[in-house]
Image (cartoon, helix red, strand yellow):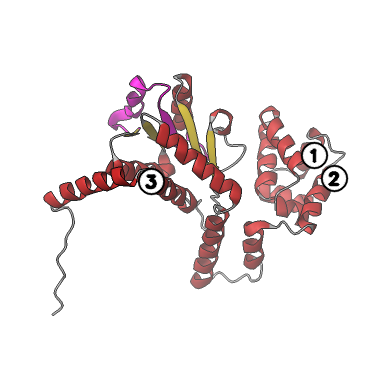
Amino acid sequence: MPPSDSLKDRIIAQYDAMSPQLQQAARYVIEHPEEVALVSMRELARLAAVQPATMTRLAKFLGLPGYDELRAQHAAVLRRGNDGFAAKVRLRLDEGNETVESDIASHMLQGLSAQIAKLCEPDSLKRLEATANRLRSARKVYVLGLRSCHAVAWHFHYVMTLLGDRSVHLDGPGGTGGDALIRATPEDVMLVISIKPYASDTLKLAQLAKDKGVGILSITDSEVSPLVGFSEQIIFCATESDSFFHTLTPALAVSEVLCTLLAEFNRPKTLEALQQADEHLAHLNTYSTAIPRRD
């Protein structure tokens, strides 16, 4: 359930001018709009890990008389029925307080299912298509994802190496990962994967690439992500989870979709590349084909 477009746009437009506390509150409002409509100001502040007065200051910073108007705008959208996937999942979570293993697993998998389904919405599909088209037109694709996002970056790079030699993974030993950008040109793009908390080195390398004229394409978690300001194309992925840790499953799904779209652009070329890869792997006896005996 998104807030009204005008309010959401206002929050995003003024985000950089906010204090750190207001930014924390604003981000929570953007990412959990249904809670703004349904819970008290004190409860919302607790969930956002800020003081209740911060919510009032946020409303006034946005030009509203007070928090009640902020809540009223979200409630109006909720009454129109635009509650989205995440709101439905949260309602299911609220039905019981038991935390047995089967419930935890069920809640996590329901949440992941809803997050993946959200990627099928028209706006998300347009972003996927536009990003794939931009990747296809580039001379080289630099791939960057640090810390938890490394797994997504590595997956994308690995599949791309099966299709050809355009992918460059910025993950060198001894802190040399950024050295691959020495010969980067405006004909290239960088696919950046980063979610909160955003790794400082990711932002530094992305900015360096941007300064060299490289097109920045991002997979990130929020419309107030620091990557938004200098990215040509952005794909947003949810990261919330019932786990103690954020989830990267939606981001990994985006990686798989992008690789498939790139492979589909030129099937004859893809066939040739994958046949070559199969022959090489077979020559190295990479995979076992033996069927284990059962005594």
Which secondary structure lies at badge 3?
helix
Looking at the image, which is closer to me, 145 or 5?
5
* Image position, residue 11 (x, y; %): 72, 36
The foreground one among 191 and 74 is 191
Position of 291 compared to 105: left or right?
Answer: left
Q: Above or below — where is 186 with respect to 217?
A: above
Farthest residue in the front direction?
Answer: 268
* One can see residue 39 in this view: no
Tell me the amino acid under the disc marked 1: Ala
Q: Please, what is the three-letter code of the amino acid marked with disc 3?
A: Ala
Does the magenta portion include 114?
no
> Label 1 to label 3, Cα distance in Å?
39 Å
Q: Mark 1 points at which residue?
A: 59
**In the image, residue 173 lies at what x, y percent?**
28, 32
Q: Quadrant of the C terminus?
A: bottom left
Distance between the alpha carbons at the discs numbered 2 and 3: 42 Å
Residue visible at 62% across and 37% down in the picture: 224
Where does the image place residue 225, in percent across and percent down from the top left? 58, 36
Q: Is residue 286 above or below residue 167?
A: below
Can residue 125 be seen from the camera position used here? yes
The residue where tag 3 is placed is 151
- Residue drawn at x 46%, y 38% is 133
**Circle 1: element type:** helix
The range drawn in magenta is: 170-199
